[in-house]
């Protein structure tokens, strides 16, 4: 018992000395809130580059046709690099069952450049269905008779079962204004 009592101070000094020499919390890099995911910074650090994965571009409700064409340029450039012929204005997203294999492969390779829908209309947005319902209310408030949300809850369908031409026409004229009004209300 006496021997272990004498060894205790030696063991404590050795343990505390080793702990004092090791890197503790004071020497660690402080954690800072960041918009860049840790995996992106870790992979950039590991590769020695500061390049971070680029997010897909996103459309805006208030964009002009020129804005949209500017968003498409990286996608069109990528599609051209994939060997698809045609002018840049011809290279948009093609969907359906009859898409040629080369087109489909090029689109898959270039997906990261295809603009996402406006956040208000994005299926990933849990409030997109509320936005669509509010837009329908706005359209009805402006006199559109046959307008409703689509089955997915985020699209707008005009004309009803009768395919009412006046409702379709008015929706076409008023939709952008109603979307902007609803978005401005937040």
Image: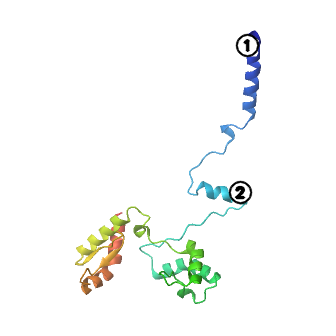
The answer to whether 151 appears left or right of 105 in the picture is: left
Pointer 1 with pointer 2, Cβ within 8 A: no
Residue 19 in the image: above or below residue 150: above
Relative depth, front residue between 149 and 20:
149
Residue at 75% across / 28% down in the picture?
Answer: 17
Question: Residue furthest toward the top?
Answer: 2
**Among the 4 quarters of the image, the one containing residue 181:** bottom left
Find the distance from the CA under tag 1 to the CA under tag 2: 49 Å
Residue 116 in percent (x, y) is at 49, 71
Residue 3 in the image: above or below residue 41: above
The answer to whether 163 appears left or right of 46 in the picture is: left
Question: Residue furthest toward the bottom?
Answer: 86
Residue at 68% across / 61% down in the picture?
Answer: 50
Residue at 75% across / 9% down in the picture?
Answer: 2
Residue 120 in percent (x, y) is at 40, 67
Q: Which mark is residue 46?
A: 2
**Among the 4 quarters of the image, the one containing residue 76:** bottom right
Which of pointers 1 and 2 lies earlier in the amino acid sequence? 1
The answer to whether 134 appears left or right of 18 in the picture is: left
Residue 107 in percent (x, y) is at 56, 78
Secondary element under disc 1, as helix, strand or loop, is helix
Residue 55 in the image: above or below residue 104: above
Q: Quadrant of the N terminus?
A: top right
The mark lying in front, picked from 1 and 2, is 1
Secondary element under disc 2, as helix, strand or loop, is helix
Residue 57 in percent (x, y) is at 53, 71
Q: Quadrant of the C terminus?
A: bottom left
Q: Which mark is residue 5?
A: 1
Residue 4 seen: yes
């Amino acid at each position: 018992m006496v021997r272990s009592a004498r060894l205790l101070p030696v063991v404590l000094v050795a343990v505390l000395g080793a702990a004092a020499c090791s890197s503790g919390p004071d020497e660690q890099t402080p954690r800072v809130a960041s918009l860049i995911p840790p995996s992106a910074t870790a992979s950039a650090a590991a590769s020695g580059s500061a390049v971070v994965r680029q997010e897909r571009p996103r459309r805006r409700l208030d964009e002009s046709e020129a804005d949209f064409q500017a968003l498409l340029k990286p996608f069109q450039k990528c599609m051209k690099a994939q060997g698809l012929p045609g002018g840049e204005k011809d290279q948009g997203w093609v969907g359906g069952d009859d898409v040629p294999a080369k087109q489909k492969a090029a689109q898959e390779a270039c997906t990261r450049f295809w603009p996402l829908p406006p956040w208000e209309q994005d299926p990933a947005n849990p409030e997109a269905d509320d936005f669509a319902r509010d837009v329908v209310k706005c359209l009805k408030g402006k006199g559109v008779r046959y307008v409703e949300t689509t089955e997915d809850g985020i699209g707008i369908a005009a004309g009803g079962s009768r395919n009412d031409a006046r409702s379709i026409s008015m929706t076409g004229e008023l939709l952008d204004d109603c979307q902007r009004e609803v978005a401005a209300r937040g």
